Structure formats: C-alpha cells, structure tokens
Amino acid sequence: MTRSADTTGTSEPAPPPAVAGRASLWHVLTVVVVAYSAGASLAFVGFGAPAIVVLFLPAGVTLSALVLNPRRRWPWILAAIAVTEIVVDVSQGMSVRSASGFALANTAEPLVGALLLRRNVPGPVDLRRRRDLLAFLGCCVVAAPIVGGAIGATTLVASVPVPWPQAFVSFWAGDATGVLTVAGCVLAWRYSPGRSGPLGWVLSVGSAVAATVIGFWPQGMPLFYLPIPVLFALAFSRPLVATLTAGLATTVTANLMTSTGHGPWAALDTSEQLITMTLQLFLATTILGAWALAVGVAERDRARSDTSVERAARLRLHALQVLTTDLAKAATSEEIAQAIVREGIGLIADHGSVALAAAGSTELVLWTTDGRPADMTDRYRGIPAGAATPHSDVMRTGRPVIHQTRTEAVAAYPHLEDVYRTLGVNSGMCVPIDGDAGALGSLAFSFHREHGADAGVIAFAVALATLSGQALRRAQMYERERDATRELQQALLPTLASGLPGIQVCADYRPADVAHQVGGDWYDVFAVPAGRVGFAVGDVVGHQLAAAAAMARLQSALRILAQTAPGPAGALDALDRASTLIPDAGTATVGYADYDPATRLLRYACAGHLPPLLVTGTGAEYLWGGRSLPLGVGRAARGQGELVMPHDAILVWYTDGLVERADEHIAENMQRLADAAGHLTAPDAATLCRHLLDRMAGAEARADDTAILCIQFAGPADAQPYSWRGDAPAVDRPAAR
Amino acid sequence: MSHFEARKIHGADRVRVALTGECDLRSRDEMTATLLEAVRASEMVIVDLAGVRFLDSSGLHALVTAHHAALERAGSLYVVNTTGTVATVLEITGVLELLRDPTQAVDGAAAGPDQPA
C-alpha cells in the first residue's frame, strides 16, 4: 500500500498548481484504479478483516484523486472507483447488492470530502499551514467519513449481524485513518514537496518501519510507542511529506503486524473491532502529533525567514536613503563612484565594484569595495576596452549578467577564476547604469554564498543603478560646465606684460577643488605711463561664468583707468564708478599698486582687499596703508600707502583663498603666511610663490580659488629688464589639483 | 549637516536676524533672501553674527546687498556681535565701519582693524 500511494504521488510531475492538466485522464484513472484495488485488497487480505473493514486506505486514494483533478474529471474517477470496488468486493465473495452499497459509500464519501475541502481551500492545499490542515481534518478526515460510514454501516447491517452504531464507528474510523494517512501523504507530496535525496527517503521510511516492527513484535513487552520518537524526530528535521510518508508506512506496518498476531494489540482479549479501532486511534494520534509538530516547526521557520527578509529589506531601504543623500552631495563622477561602492554595494554584497566609462577613452575605470588584496586593486584599476569581464560585457550589451554559482561564473570568465578563488566569490551579478546613449557604467555585486543574487538583491541593484545613473548624468553635466568655466577663466586671465624694467614676477592660480566655487579671482601686471609698472589682484564675488566674465571686465577696466589715474587710490576710485556699469561685478575687492623703478617708490591701495605682504631680508610684514571699502559698496574716500622698496624685496598680493578657511581664524592664517614668508632666506619670486602655496594649502580640499602674485624688486646691481620665472606664458599651472 | 541657519525675530520696530554657521557661497542665496525679506519687513534690521563661524566674500556681499536695499528704503541695517575671524574679515575689508551699530560707533573711534602682523 505504501508503494501504491507513492505511485499515486509521484506519477505526476511535482510542481503544484495545474496538477491534472499534465497527466492524461487515462493515466489518472489507471493510477487510481491500481492504487484503489491494491489498497482494497490489502484491507481484505493483509488486514484480515473481511467483514468489518478497519483500515481502509483506498478512501485516501479517491479523495486525493478528486482534490488533485478538475471537476470535469470527477465523474470518470468516481465511476472507475465504483466499478473497481464492486469488482474487488465480488471477487472477495460479496453479493453484488452489498458491493453496490459499498461502492456508493466509497464514492459519496470522497465526493463530499473533496467538495467541502475545495469550498474552504480553493487553491493549493498546504498542509503545513494551520488553516489548511484544519480544513483538511474537518472536511475530509472527520465529516466525509461520516457520510461514508453511514452508507457503509447501513449496507453492512443488511448482510452481517452487527449493531448499526458499531458498524458505523468501525467504518468511520477505518476511512478516517485511510484519508488521514494516504490523502495527507499525497497532498503533501503535491503541494509542499521537500527537497530530499533517495537515501533520505529510504532512511526516514526505513527507520519508521523498523521502529514499528520492533515495537509491534513482542507481546509481553509494551514497546508499541517506539514509532513515536521516530515520527517526531522526522517532523522536527524533515519536510512534512517525509513525516507523513513515514506515518503511512508505520500505519500499514502496525496493522500488518497486528493482523499477523504480533504486538500488544494482537494479544488483547477483546473484540476484533475494538482492537483494530483502538489501534487506528493510536496510530492516528501519533501521526497527528507528529503532524502538529511539523506545522509548528514550519510556522517558526516561516516567521524566522520573514523576519530576516524584513530585516534585509529594511537594511537595503536605509542604505538607499543614506546613499541618496550622499549622491546629492557628490559633485563629481569620482565622488559618486566612491559613495556607491561605500554605501551601496558594500552594504549588501561581500565584494563589488563600480566601473565607469572613462572620459575620452574606451577604458573602464574601476572602484572596488575595501578588503581585497592591494595588488588586485591595482591590477583591476582600469579595464581595457574589449576585455572579457562582467563589467565589459554589461557595458557592451546593456544587459545584466548573473552567475549563481562559481562554476557558472568560471565557465563564462575562465581567466577570472583566480580572482573568484582569492576573494571566495561563489555567486555574483553585474547590472548596467543606463545613460541617455548606452551604459554609463556598471555595478558588480559578488557574494561568498551561492545564489546570492536573490529577488531582493536584484531589486536593490536595479534601484542602485537607477540612482547612480541620475547622479552620474548630473555630475557629467556639471563636470562639463566646470571644465568649460575653468577653461574660460584661464583664458580670461590677462597675459602679463613682458619686458618691464627692474622686476621679476611669478604668479600662480589654483581653482577651488569644490567645483561650483569657481570664482572670479584675478591678478595682473602691466605698464603704466612714466615708466611705472602696475600690479593688481582682485576677487569678484560670485561663481561660475558670470563671476569670471565680470572679473575679466574689471581687469580690463583697471588696466585702462590706471593709465590716466593719478595713482592707485584714484585708479580704484575710477574703477568703483566703472564697476556700477559692469554686470555681475557686485562686491569686488581689489588691490592695486604701482612702482617706479627709477625712484623705487611703491604706491598701493586696497579696496577691501587683503593687505599685501612685504617680504624683505629681515622678515615679512603686511602693508596696512591705503585701505578703503570694497568696490560696489558705496562712495568712500580712498587713500593710498607709499613705500620705498628695499633692494630684493618681494611684494606678495594674494586672494582670500590663501588665508580663509572655515573654522580657522583669518588673523592666525595671515600670521602663518607672514611667518612662512619671513623664514625663507633670500628667496626669489618663484621660490617664494611656490613655498607660500605649499605651506598655506591645508590637507583639506580648497573651498575657494586662490591667486598669488609675487613681485621681486631687483637690487641696483642686477637692475636688468623684467623677466619671468616660472612656466607658461601667464600661469604656473599646478601639476596636481 | 545644516552648515548655515538664519532665524528672524520680529520686534516692535525692528527685525533681528540671527545667523549661525558658515556664510559662504553655499549659503549666500539663503542668507541674501533672508536679509532682504527682513529689510522689506522693517526699517531697522539688526543682523546678529554671534553664531557665525566663517564669513567670506560671498557672505560679505550678501550683507552689503542687504545694506543697500535698506538704504534704498530709507531704512538701516547693521551688524552686532561680531567676533573672531568674522570681525577680522569685516574690519579688513572695511565693511564693519559701514555696518556698525551707529549708537556704538562713537566709542570705537580709535579702532583700526585688528591688525595681525
């Protein structure tokens, strides 16, 4: 019987829903008839109960067949059952009238059971769920056999002299146990199959049978409870279907043992009906106990996995929120890639990387998560175009690549096997970051576990790629704008006059690291009438192109106005008036000085600008003369300072980027600048320029533009013509930002 | 996270704007808007800089712009509680003279900028 039940269960392929659609009607009928007649014959022959059937396994066969098949097949199935029942009964020597009565009982019962169950559980019947289990027990195990029992008992009392109630209870108990064990088994096979190898099945069924045989062998020693721990252990550790199959095996074995005169029930000195009834009661109780335990375990596991799934989802959501904030702050592609690696990939994957298409090259630039060997980081820092890597393939095709095992991954990328082994990667996935025209880059996630790319992880990866795409598009626009602004700004910086007498000049300009703070700093050196030389430095408030344009206009205006102004104060006064006509000039600070090589007289004025630093052989000091309000603030009297320059003295003009830092006092930084300049012995303009920039640039990113202009006033001995130190026509472009 | 904040307190005949954090390019627009709103709301605006850690040329420009707006409406705007690097920046640029509380300007007559070096 165990085998016939197994046949019923495995004859159709495992996946649950459209059960009956797969197997043909003839197939189903054959299986049902074979299983039914085997069960019925077993009841007669094996259990030796020709008159009162005490364990009727076929009741479970019919019910399973109905539940698993669509209703249009039910008449065929029921008809086949009726015919089989009559044939089996008549062959066992029953009258056709009795056989017809039992046929009616054994078709009405499963029909009622299946109708009731389907009414309560329309879809798959998951016997691991409390609700489905109760519906199954109530409809199929308790209610339906009442119908079958009533018809069967009525048929029975017509031919055998037994009281109706006794016949009814026997009939009911036999059918109920049959449904419980067989239908429970089949439905578990169908709707909640567990993963288990053949060895597992042999072990679980074998141990149940062995425990039952041992438990039901001796009559003098009560060992009949031995199957209980076996079934409970299976319920705790194996899928429900294994427990129920073992329960069915136990039931069949126990009945066979008892009917062959073994075990404590066979030794009982009472009516056979009571013996078999109490035996079925014991078996049903044992199986139900194990079943309840299995349901409890399944519920606990489900709750546990729900919690862990929930926790993982919450973690991912939080990660996305943090990342969204950080991406909003990241200005450049580099910052974005770092944020994605740090706060996106690193949070859900064991390893991972971001690859971005390098600007103006076919190479991919890679940012990896922490925790991989340093040589590997270097080795994969850039990926040449056309290399066979997940990143390259995803970039080329625009489609994700997913490998759920290392074997799959190595099959696709054999040369990366050592990488997978070194990192302990067993599954991974790579998704594209979509741009307007093709992929902007790709995100790779690698896992130590197999099948790491589950649904939640894939959804996260796609969300991350979308976020990254938006941020990257913004950053690229921004970088283009910044580069254009910088280029324009550099182009707008004046070409310094050359061949000016008695001075050496060195200038440098470093744009802010924070790109949107590209401002309007400038410096200038030019000739003014009467053999003088003019030096200017200025800072227009504002950002981007507007400030750069205003800076260029102010610079030109100053060059022109200085030609006719009586001196620096006058030049700044004229520039202040002119600045009202220059759009976006806003508030600007300007320092301007002129120098007469013949008399070595320096005249200087500062419209709100930081004071120039005078560096001589004996130290450095700020020149605090000639101060007035910035341009564009309001009419103000402007004065100027005058000074005869010592030989080899250097005048340093600079903008606020050199000395202004958040959280630092500007006075302290100015002191630092003066000290740095004063400690240098006999510097030339270029050395001083570089030295001051190095000393004043903090470790942190420059938040503002920095311009510096050093003018060295030659001694009498080397009053040679003006000459340049430093590179390039106008500017020492910094090697590194 | 919030590197700049502005709070307005409306008094009977004046608005006091308390700024905190960094008055730089990032906060310039917010700072300018707040100050101009205050100037439109009252003839006298007092800008409290006690909580300002950093003020650069952008912040300076915002103050000057609001000052001009106040003058155009025949009102006035001045700053109080200037300390540390903020005071020095205002002094060096000469803007402190422009924005100083007129009732206190007298006793500060001798003041040149707090000159380093």
Image (tube, grey):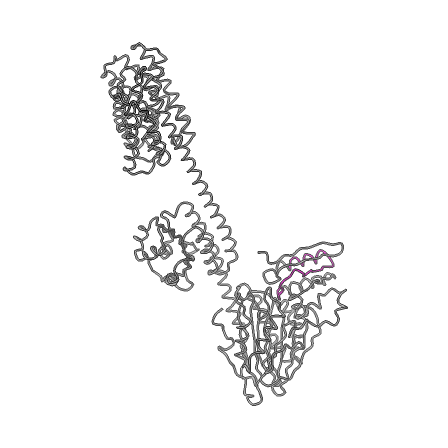
Name the residue located 62 percent from the left edge and 83 percent from the top edge: A595
The answer to which image quadrant residue A22 occupies is: top left
- Can you give x and y, in whole percent of width and height, for residue A154 in the image? 34, 12
Residue B24 falls inside the magenta stretch: no
- Can you give x and y, in whole percent of width and height, for residue A11 in the image? 27, 32
Query: Can I make out residue A734 in this image?
Result: yes
Name the residue located 50 percent from the left edge and 58 percent from the top edge: A330
The answer to which image quadrant residue A685 occupies is: bottom right
For residue A519, side relative to residue A373 (left or right)? right
Q: Is residue A722 above or below residue A254?
A: below
Q: Nearer the viewer, residue A571 or B117?
A: B117
Q: Nearer the viewer, residue A229 or A667?
A: A229
Q: Is residue B38 above or below residue A619?
A: above
Q: Nearer the viewer, residue B68 or A107?
A: A107
Q: Nearer the viewer, residue A309 or A542?
A: A309
Q: Quadrant of the N terminus of chain A?
A: top left
Residue at the far front in the pictured view:
A220
Look at the image and give the residue range highlighted in magenta: B32-58
- Can you give x and y, in whole percent of width and height, for residue A474 in the image? 49, 57
Residue at the far bottom in the pictured view:
A717
Residue B43 falls inside the magenta stretch: yes
Query: Can I make out residue A76 in this image?
Result: no
